[in-house]
Amino acid sequence: MQVSKTLDYAVRSLTFMGVSPESKFGMKEISESQHIPINYLAKIMRRLVNRGIIRSMVGPEGGYILRKMPSEVSLREVYEAIEGEIRIIDCMDKENVCALYGNCAQLPVWDRLKVSMIKLLEGTTLDDMVSDMINGNNNSERVVSN
Amino acid sequence: MQVSKTLDYAVRSLTFMGVSPESKFGMKEISESQHIPINYLAKIMRRLVNRGIIRSMVGPEGGYILRKMPSEVSLREVYEAIEGEIRIIDCMDKENVCALYGNCAQLPVWDRLKVSMIKLLEGTTLDDMVSDMINGNNNSERVVSN
DNA sequence: AATAAAATATGCAGGTAAGTAAAACACTTG
DNA sequence: CAAGTGTTTTACTTACCTGCATATTTTATT
């Protein structure tokens, strides 16, 4: 029940870019400033390109640039670009049928968590996160609590 | 960002036992009815024993039995028995320091998710889940939504 | 035009942790 | 002592993460 590094890296990159939404950023620049393994970053950025969140340009003067304004990119969109459809628990077996159908006690709980999670992700944009960061509403107990 | 199979299995087992809180259950019984690999189940049950949620007895007539009433076992307790402290994102490097300290844009979001998650888990007991199941408040779109 | 250089894109291999399975072990009852 | 049951160890498989090497595309230079 943790955010994967992949999603973490994607969010780091996008918020980094969100500070200057019109600018172009090189992989090296993102990788070094955000402490992301550059080989992995390439693959992550590819997913964001495919999803239409960013655009990539190859060659000298190449790099990545946001395709939408930060206020128009929700965390949910980023999440789904990386992880696919939001799904708290995977209760299906291979035939796409639940072995406990009608006897599952925990589904309602995870459904509730899913709803509040979607609400949170949907309601948070890149712009929100960037603003919070600039205004210092972050690093609350950064070291001790996590 | 998914519930691990381990936690899923733990919850399945406990809710199964929660229906008859005073009864003793064999591993085979739990494994077969809940579709849990029996070898893995053994290890999971051990963690619940160590945490004081259940008690185990070896030998013929052995098995597992709840140590508290279902209304006194919160989902949070189960979660922590299996996964350890609730932590949405692991933003520390090896030296237990965050590389982005003071420049992290996403921490506030995950903190909010963590809070609502803790509230949900803390406020849900085994008894709640068992009751929901018995009253049929489960399997909502079981097949399609997950 | 041709070539070199710079950047992203892609494929392959290894490490680690979760999940699974099988076997050997240890305890308890009759 | 024998049988039944939980405990522990070992090994295998898969997915996530990382690093290295190579390919592909575009710009700049000559």
Image (cartoon, coloured by chain):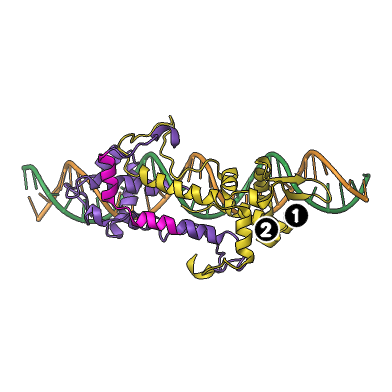
Chain colours: A purple, B yellow, C orange, D green
At a point 61% along the width and 54% down the height, the residue shown is B11
Q: Could you say which quadrant of the image residue A91 lies in?
A: bottom right
- The answer for how far apart the CA atoms under marks 2 and 1 are is 9 Å
Verify whether residue A120 appears in magenta.
yes
Q: Which of the 4 image quadrants contains residue B55?
A: top right
Residue A3 x, y percent position in the rendering = 43, 48
User: With respect to residue B118, does A53 lie above or below?
Assistant: below
- Report crowding for label 1: few under 14, some 14 to 19, many 20 or more residues within 10 A (C-alpha): some
Main SS class of the magenta portion in the image: helix
In the image, taking residue A21 as reference, residue A40 lies left or right, namely: right
Q: Amino acid at mark 1?
A: Phe
Mark 1 element type: loop
Q: Is residue A102 magenta?
A: no
Q: Which residues are magenta?
A: A115-135
For disc 1, the marked residue is: B25
- The answer to whether marks 2 and 1 mark residues whose Cβ atoms lie closer than 8 Å is yes
Image quarter hosting the C terminus of chain A: top left
Q: Which residue is label 2 attached to?
A: B16
Q: Earlier in the sequence, mark 2 or mark 1?
A: 2
Q: Position of residue B68 (x, y in %)?
A: 69, 47
Left or right: A53 in relation to B70: left
Q: Position of residue B132 (x, y in %)?
A: 60, 62
Q: Which quarter of the picture shows residue B99?
A: top left
Disc 2 is placed on an element classified as helix
The amino acid at mark 2 is Phe
Q: Is residue C15 above or below residue A3?
A: above
From the viewer's perspective, tell me whether residue B67 is left or right of residue B136: right
